């Protein structure tokens, strides 16, 4: 089994109109703000269709055995989502809707406990999204369209920025890996081409970086800054002052990746 | 492309092939006794993590072609734990000599960048890397390479790339060396960190119950390679740290054509190992079994 699939679209597709219908059935007051408020800016909220307590506002996704989870009242109220969820023939853990409101962002992070190796997988079914939505995994932008189903290895660094005018809502299905799931992932990764592109902010940062390489004055302004957050902000400011449109997210991500790569060197001395 | 003030930091493998990573060093001279320490000091600053720069090997070669390095006046092969750091400090002492001491990017190039290439290409890349490391800053007028211990096995390539450059092989008496190595084992004596082939060994040379065997066999291969080298190549000089002792540095300086005014006096005598030699009879046995014959051959050639 190939456990190093970074992401893959899956072969099933669902009807966006019916996804929207079920989404409209969820009362606004059930949406619960995400618990880890350091990780996002704006509004990042969730409801549960299946949770440990069986409550709709219990939005945690703990790593308990699948049969410890119970459907919440919302599952019954959303017949199409129920059918979508049943398409996946692996033991279900938490099933939630995650909503990132217009203008909000989830900072880059890693979900180290979510991995095929640990016997867990997470499937995303986009229910509502927009063209300005930037979903970036390992510094590649993935285009997830409404009605598609995706597996993503979230132990990779990932971040989301909803730069559009509308909310982004995904049905997020957590489950226990079984032979059916493994076969599905393996077949999908082999047969389905998933196109990715470089996030715009990363391309802008790379262009700025080329400029720094050639610009002694910029170098001498930035090089002496020893405090990392201060340097990263100074880089964003210097870029914006020169017309390069990237933000802290991108600079932080490149910085972290470069540091990781540097630390991973083997120097046998 | 302007690489003025940029120093090679690594060889990285990308989808498109091998590339050189560079770090901005500016006009700072290169005189530390450990190139890797220089890099670590650089990378402690966040700027250098964010703004490491990558180019092709071709771009490095083209840059060096148009920006001649300080002439390479000497190459030091050595066994480690033999006074090599003190020698690097000695050579760099006066600020006129640019010393790359165990430059990691050069080692990465040799191990990751050169295998399976035609010899003529290997020579081109090796010259380009040495040239990029040897770009003179401040008062630097000459450059020196102090290599990694296993590079003695690549001496033919170095001689082909730098036929005019004098070289030395610096070593020590086997028991003293083994004692020093076992007291403070370098990472390259661990087969998972440096592939045994680099030391001309195999994995089965590693005996977990007898940690002295693997380094002893590594030293055997280094002694043997240096014997072959000194018989095959001109311009070589053997230096025994323990025996040449205080005279080692002045012999090296003369061999590299450095005049008295080009170097400062050596900072005191290298610690003698005679107090250690009485030591461990187990190591004496290992040295006798693997190393004594080759060591005596080296000593006969050295004198």
Image (tube, rainbow, N blue to C red):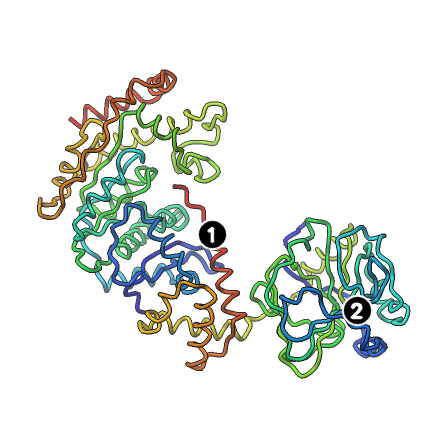
Q: Identify the mark at residue B99; answer none if there is no mark.
A: none
**Is label 2 or label 1 in front?**
2
- Residue B66, position in %: x, y? 23, 64
The answer to whether residue A250 is above or below residue B89 is: below
Residue, disc 2: A47
Question: Real-space Cα distance between discs 2 and 1?
Answer: 39 Å
The answer to whether residue B118 is above or below residue B196 is: below
Nearer the N terminus, badge 2 or badge 1? 2
Q: Residues within 10 Å of mark 2 (few under 14, many from 20)?
A: many
Residue, disc 1: A263
- The image quarter containing residue B64 is bottom left
- Residue B69, position in %: x, y? 22, 57
Asked which secondary structure carries label 1, the reply is: helix
Left or right: residue B176 versus residue A113 is left
- Residue B115, position in %: x, y? 39, 46
Q: Is residue A38 visible?
A: yes
Q: Chain of mark 2?
A: A
């Amino acid at each position: 089994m190939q456990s190093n699939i970074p992401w893959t679209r899956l072969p099933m597709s669902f009807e966006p109109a019916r996804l929207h219908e079920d989404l409209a059935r969820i009362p606004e007051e059930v949406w619960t703000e995400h618990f880890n408020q350091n990780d996002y800016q704006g509004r990042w909220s969730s409801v549960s269709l299946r949770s440990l307590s069986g409550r709709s506002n219990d939005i945690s996704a703990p790593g308990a055995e699948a049969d410890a989870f119970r459907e919440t009242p919302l599952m019954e109220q959303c017949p199409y989502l129920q059918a979508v969820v049943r398409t996946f023939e692996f033991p279900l853990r938490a099933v939630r809707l995650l909503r990132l409101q217009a203008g909000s962002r989830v900072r880059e992070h890693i979900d180290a406990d979510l991995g095929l190796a640990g016997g867990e997988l997470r499937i995303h079914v986009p229910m509502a999204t927009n063209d300005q939505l930037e979903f970036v995994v390992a510094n590649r932008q993935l285009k997830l369209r409404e009605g598609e189903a995706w597996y993503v290895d979230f132990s990779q660094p990932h971040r989301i920025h909803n730069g559009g005018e509308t909310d982004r809502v995904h049905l997020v299905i957590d489950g226990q890996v079984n032979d059916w799931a493994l076969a599905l992932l393996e077949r999908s990764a082999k047969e389905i081409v998933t196109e990715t592109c470089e996030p715009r902010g990363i391309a802008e940062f790379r262009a700025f970086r080329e400029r720094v390489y050639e610009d002694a004055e910029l170098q001498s302004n930035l090089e002496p800054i020893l405090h990392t957050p201060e340097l990263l902000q100074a880089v964003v400011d210097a870029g914006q002052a020169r017309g390069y449109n990237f933000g802290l997210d991108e600079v932080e991500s490149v910085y972290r990746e470069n540091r990781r790569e540097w630390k991973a060197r083997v120097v046998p001395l | 492309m302007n690489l003025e003030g940029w120093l090679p930091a690594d060889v990285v493998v990308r989808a498109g092939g091998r590339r050189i990573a560079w770090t901005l060093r500016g006009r700072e001279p290169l005189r530390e006794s450990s190139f890797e320490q220089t890099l670590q000091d650089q990378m402690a600053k966040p700027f250098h993590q964010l703004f490491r720069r990558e180019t092709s090997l071709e771009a490095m070669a083209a840059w060096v072609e148009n920006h001649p390095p300080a002439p390479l006046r000497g190459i030091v092969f050595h066994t480690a734990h033999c006074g090599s750091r003190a020698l690097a400090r000695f050579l760099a002492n006066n600020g006129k000599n640019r010393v790359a001491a165990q430059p990691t990017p050069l080692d990465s190039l040799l191990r990751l960048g050169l295998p399976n290439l035609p010899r003529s290409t290997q020579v081109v890349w090796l010259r380009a890397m040495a040239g990029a490391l040897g770009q003179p800053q401040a008062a630097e007028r000459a450059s020196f390479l102090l290599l990694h211990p296993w590079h003695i096995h690549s001496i033919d390539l170095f001689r082909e790339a730098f036929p005019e450059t004098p070289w030395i092989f610096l070593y020590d008496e086997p028991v003293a060396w083994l004692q020093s190595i076992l007291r403070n084992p370098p990472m390259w004596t661990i087969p998972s960190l440096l592939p045994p082939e680099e030391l001309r060994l195999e994995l089965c040379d590693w005996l977990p119950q007898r940690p002295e065997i693997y380094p002893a066999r590594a030293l055997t291969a280094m002694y043997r390679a240096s014997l072959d080298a000194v018989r095959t190549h001109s311009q070589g000089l053997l230096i025994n740290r323990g025996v040449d002792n205080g005279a080692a540095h002045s012999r090296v300086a003369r061999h590299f054509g450095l005049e008295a005014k080009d170097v400062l006096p050596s900072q005191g005598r290298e610690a003698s190992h005679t107090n250690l030699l009485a030591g461990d009879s187990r190591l004496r046995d290992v040295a006798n079994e693997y190393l004594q014959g080759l060591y005596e051959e080296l000593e006969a050639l050295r004198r």
